[in-house]
Structure formats: C-alpha cells, structure tokens
Image (cartoon, grey):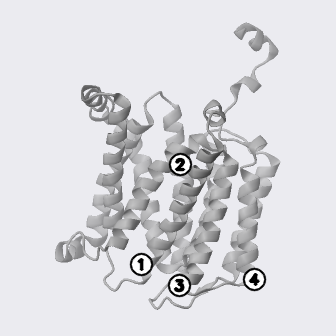
Amino acid sequence: MSAARENVSLPFKLYCLTVMTLVAATYTVALRYTRTVQTELYFSTTAVCITEVIKLFLSVGILAKESGSLSRLITSLKENVFGSPKELLKLSVPSLVYALQNNMAFVALSNLDAAVYQVTYQLKIPCTALCTVLMLKRSLSKLQWFSVFMLCGGVTLVQWEPAQATKVQVEQNPWLGFGAIAVAVLCSGFAGVYFEKVLKSSDTSLWVRNIQMYLSGIAVTLFGVYMSDGAQVLEKGFFYGYTHYVWFVIFLASVGGLYTSVVVKYTDNIMKGFSAAAAIVLSTVASVILFGLQLTTTFLVGAILVCISIYFYGFPRQDTTKIQPAETKSPKERLDTV
C-alpha cells in the first residue's frame, strides 16, 4: 500500500482530497436541506434501503471488471456469496450496524444543523480508536491519545452553546439529534473496525465482501422500512416525497462510500485529516448561507480544536492503520527469516 502511495502523483492525491471533501460536505448539507426545506417529507428508511441497492449493483459492476469475464464473475459469486452462508451471516453484523448508523444520520440532520453535525460526528475518531485497541489489539501513541481528548473537548465546546439556524422553520429536537449522533458514532466505530478485521482474516476481494454486506444490508433495511414506516409506505408509496434533491443525497451516499474505500489507499492519514477538516469548514459556510446559521465563539473555538486534533491523530509517524509485525520480531527470528 505504501508503494502505491509513492507512485501516485501529487495532482491525483489533490484530486482525491478534493472529491472526498466535497462528497462529505455536500452530502451533509444536502441531506439537511431535504429534511428541513421540503414540505412533503420522504421516508428516510426507504432512502437508506435504496442506497444499499445501488451500492450492491456498483460493487457487482466493479467485481465484474476485476474478474475480467462474465464466467469468472458468476463463479466468484457462486463460491463466495451464494455458496457461503456463513460468510453472509458474518457480514450481516456490520450491515445491521451500518443500517442503524445511516438511519441515525437522517434523524440527526433532521434536528441539528449540518455544521454542528459535521463537527460532532468526528467523535467517531475516538470511538474507532477505542474499538481498534480492544478488537485489533493495537496501541495508540501519546500524541494520538492527546488528540482524542482534544477532539472531545472541541465537541464539548460546540455543544456548550450550539449555533442556531435562523432560516429553518421546522420543529427540531436538539437532544434527539445529539442522541442520534451518539448512536451513529458508536455504530461507525464498531462496524468499521469489525469490517476491517473480517477483510484481514482472509484474501477475499474487497468487492466480494461488499456484496456480502450489501445483500444483508438490503434485507435489514427492508425490515427497517416495514417496522418503522410500513403502514405509511403502503398508503403513500415507497418513493413518496422523492425529489431530485433526495436522489442526489442517495447518489452521494452510494458513490461516496465506495469511492472513499478505493481512493483511501492512495492517500495518507494527513490527507484524510485535511479532508475532514475542510468538510467542516465547507459545511459551516454552506450552513451560514443556506440556513442562516449564527456562529458563536464557543462553536468556532470548538471547531478549530476538532480540526487540529484530526491532524494530530493522523500524524504520519504515529499511523496505526497498519500492523508492523516485523518490529516485534526478536533478533533470532530475523536471522531465521533471512
């Protein structure tokens, strides 16, 4: 992976950074717009379900290109997907958690401004760090632990005196929004680390794993539609309230995750940190323009602390995204290897 990063030109890395930033910021602002401006509110559970369907088709398409022929694709699907019920069951865990996370994002952005959401959602970093330590048995550096506490402090400041949006007229419940973010953060940390552990437990293609997860995800999200909005969906229709803005949000959610999983291997933690920080800035600017967000001093200070902590957490020499077993070998083991 490091060799791949070294062979990639700076313009391509900047392209990756730009796209990742725009997708993250635009998705948050667009979702907030569809939940606060439209008069006929669509069912968020159906949007999450459609997103899983699109991701499944995109993953099958990428796997087809990776396989090289239709026969190889069919063989791969038979062996790794339809012929592996245990693997499907294993991937149903993160698909269930991700489905809950995505639904919580809709709840949060129905009750919180996009900028407040974007900053608070960065709590996924310490949550992921904790899951990494517990589930993957990795360790964090002192700088990373310091950045985790700094990030928590920054988010606390943001929530201490939340910025208010003057152009949003719909009824909102900030506490419900904060609770939804808390659930989404926990889901993000656990599901991300769990999926990474599954990926590294075998040589199975990333896209095969994605297909396994999205198949389970479709079943889970359909069940969510039935349980949460079943009666209303039967009465008004599955696509009730859908506009081109809603489809745009679904497109960003579908393509954004897959695109990020592809380009991350060409970037490093510093670039991902800059992307997250830039997304916070763009979301804040967009919220001021579109929703009349009134910024407070505590919000600005908190947002700056969060951006700095993201940079510190991804500092190159403290990168914990890779396991380096060579460093744990004794001199005798190194001689035996040679």
Can you identify the residue that label 3 sits on?
291
Q: Earlier in the sequence, mark 1 or mark 2?
A: 1
Local crowd size for mark 4, using a 10 Å CA cut-off: few (<14), some (14–19), many (≥20): few
Q: Is 38 left, or right, of 166 in this rendering?
A: left
How many angstroms separate mark 1 from mark 2 (CA)?
Answer: 26 Å
The amino acid sitting under disc 1 is: Arg
Q: Residue at x 32, y 32 (%)?
A: 84
Q: Earlier in the sequence, mark 2 or mark 3?
A: 2
The amino acid sitting under disc 4 is: Thr
Number of numbered discs on residues: 4
Q: Residue at x 76, y 48 (%)?
A: 315
Q: Position of residue 278 (x, y in %)?
A: 64, 63
Q: Position of residue 157 (x, y in %)?
A: 73, 76
Instruction: Report helix, strand or loop for mark 3.
Output: helix
Local crowd size for mark 3, using a 10 Å CA cut-off: few (<14), some (14–19), many (≥20): many
Can you identify the residue that label 2 sits on?
192
The amino acid sitting under disc 3 is: Phe
Q: Position of residue 102 (x, y in %)?
A: 44, 62
- Badge number at residue 297: 4
How many angstroms separate mark 2 from mark 4 (CA)?
Answer: 33 Å
The amino acid sitting under disc 2 is: Gly
